[in-house]
Amino acid sequence: MTFLSISDVVLAATTNWPGLPPDCWSEARIVHNIDNWKKLPQNFKIEKVKIEKPVKFENVSPNKGYSYKNEGFRPDVTISIYAEKDHLTVIKITDVFGVSDIKWINEKLLFIRIWWGRIAIDDVIFDVEKEAIVYTEPAVDGFQAYQQYKDFCKKLGGCKCINKEDSIAQIQDSDYINIVKKTKAGVLEKGLPDIVIPQWLENTFTCGGKATWEVNDCGEGGDGRTAPACVESIIPQQNGYYLHISIIVADTTGQKIAKPQTMMIYFRKPDGYKTLDLINVKTISEAIRLYKTDLSVKSK
């Protein structure tokens, strides 16, 4: 018995997808754009077996007259059909990995899905009155390709939707950052000036370079828990320290919140050590007071 290998099928299936490529799928699917497996002529045989009286098998046609039964699994499967004739139509399928989804699709047509390997498929529609195949179509189980595209999409030349998702994420990050840049400082806390946050930061904290902006998980998602989205501004100070301020812009589902909220403020030495951790302060005003009075921030 010779089964088609996974590598043969995946190589055949990595191009010319009829719809979107596997990295765009939400789950694995059967795909119907594969070349003919050329297995049916040698491995699908039809015979006639005389009977003395009518029979009725367990799988009955919608017309209540025809019926079939299937026997065997691997490597050979037999389907016996009674269609109100003086004989049974016996289909013998050999050298198979399995046969599945045998079912009536109308009163006289029988659908048969034949697996020549773990992912190589031929779909067959058999007319029990004509005792002949009236339609065939090769297919492939896309599970292997789906997994490979997810894991190695760049090597397989796909990544259409993964790249698109990355682009969407970049657009979302930019959107979050713009929200913060357009928000007035007074929204964060009563008593702060009615100017946009970047201008307020520049006026309040002595800047020693250009601020950078990024989006992260508010520092809570590292252990696998879901976390809200934060925009963090990192501002170099003239004394060599870095000011970090994180502002919550979206909840754990990604929905933007009505008013951005301060998550944390701290100062970091060039070696990464937090010299003035203000996470637990109750107000931004208190953080500013500590900043202005803390000698470790004012001088190295």
Image (spheres, rainbow, N blue to C red):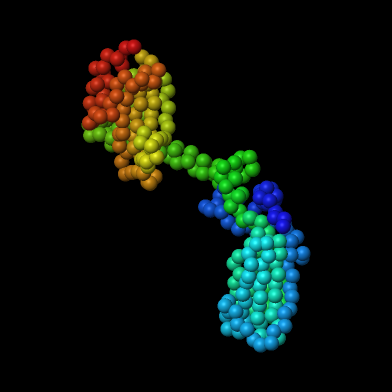
Q: Residue at x 60, y 79 (%)?
A: 57
In this picture, residue 116 sits left or right of residue 152 = right
* Residue 179, placed above or below residue 118: above
User: Is residue 160 something one can see in this rendering?
Assistant: no
Q: Quadrant of the C terminus?
A: top left
Q: Residue at x 68, y 48 (%)?
A: 7
Find residue 154 and report its image quarter.
top right
Nearer to me, 119 or 248: 119
Nearer to me, 105 or 203: 105
Q: Which residue is most to the top? A: 300
Q: How many marks?
A: 0
Q: Quadrant of the N terminus?
A: bottom right
In the rendered image, residue 68, in percent from the top left (x then y), is placed at: 62, 77
* Residue 215, placed above or below residue 168: above
Find residue 269 and report its image quarter.
top left
* Residue 77, placed above or below residue 232: below
Q: Which residue is most to the bottom? A: 53
In the rendered image, residue 85, in percent from the top left (x then y), is placed at: 69, 85
In the rendered image, residue 15, in percent from the top left (x then y), is placed at: 67, 49
Find residue 294 and report its image quarter.
top left
User: Is residue 258 something one can see in this rendering?
Assistant: yes
Nearer to me, 247 or 193: 247
In this picture, residue 140 sits left or right of residue 277 = right
In this picture, residue 246 sits left or right of residue 146 = left
In the rendered image, residue 12, in percent from the top left (x then y), is placed at: 70, 51
* Residue 169, placed above or below residue 44: above
Q: Residue at x 66, y 77 (%)?
A: 81
